[in-house]
Amino acid sequence: EYVTANVGEIKFEFKAGNFFQNNPYVLPLMVERVLTAATKPNGQGESMTHLIDCYCGSGLFCLSASSMFDVCVGIEVNEKAVKEATANAERNDITNCKFVAASAEAIFESEDPVEVTHSTTGETNSELVKDFPRSTTAVVLDPPRKGCSTQFLSQLEEFGPERVVYMSCDPATQARDARVIGEAGYDVVSVEPFDLFPQTRHIECLAVFERRREGRATEAAR
């Protein structure tokens, strides 16, 4: 049995029992905050052009952001979720998103080209993720409770995107990973919790990281 959910203008369909955020009141706000962070112009005032959505599930963030980026790629270890994400893209006539069934550690070194069709120009482009322009690429992370692996974080550091937008269901592992990301040359510019499960100890927490530049004042430090 499949479940249908609308988030913003995107219609999602996923198999009952598969993971999907289940608070329909807070979820749109949470997605909006992720998109706002991911699409903010970089330090040179340039628009962000490429999005990498790691641990993408059924495509929630990747598809929701598709109209704001030239190219979006999502990676997810669950092959069934990748099929759902691909079907959700087709269902919403989204042509600039590509989904890959693999562990997050595989995305930055992939030799498989990302072939997408620009939604406005109709042009089809083929790029390798490792060739994405670093200064206009945002990486969204939404890992399971255990957080990101040390291998993935090392690859993220080597890739060096302009921005990392990290959503977590466990602030403890997020804090652990935030220290590594900070040591890799990033500043925390904002932290915001979301209470999707009222009257429980569980929260989702959004942390946004920018490549470090001298003189930047962070919202999280104010």
Image (cartoon, rainbow, N blue to C red):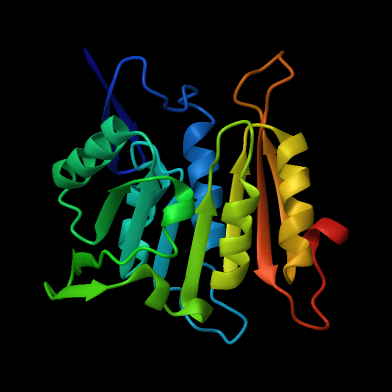
Residue located at (70% from left, 38% from top): 193
> Residue pushed farthest right?
222
Q: Is residue 157 left or right of residue 55?
A: right
Residue located at (57% from left, 78% from top): 42
Q: 192 or 160: which is nearer to us?
A: 160
Residue located at (49% from left, 33% from top): 27
Residue located at (60% from left, 25% from top): 196
> Residue pushed farthest bottom?
44
Quarter of the image for residue 44 reads: bottom right
Pick the quarter of the image with the N terminus.
top left
Residue 98 showing in the rendered view: yes
Q: Is residue 210 left or right of residue 83?
A: right
Above or below, comparing residue 147 to residue 25 in the picture: below
Q: Position of residue 132 (x, y in %)?
A: 40, 75
Q: Position of residue 187 (x, y in %)?
A: 76, 66
Q: 159 or 122: which is nearer to us?
A: 159
Above or below, comparing residue 55 to residue 53 in the picture: above
Above or below, comparing residue 176 to residue 96 in the picture: above
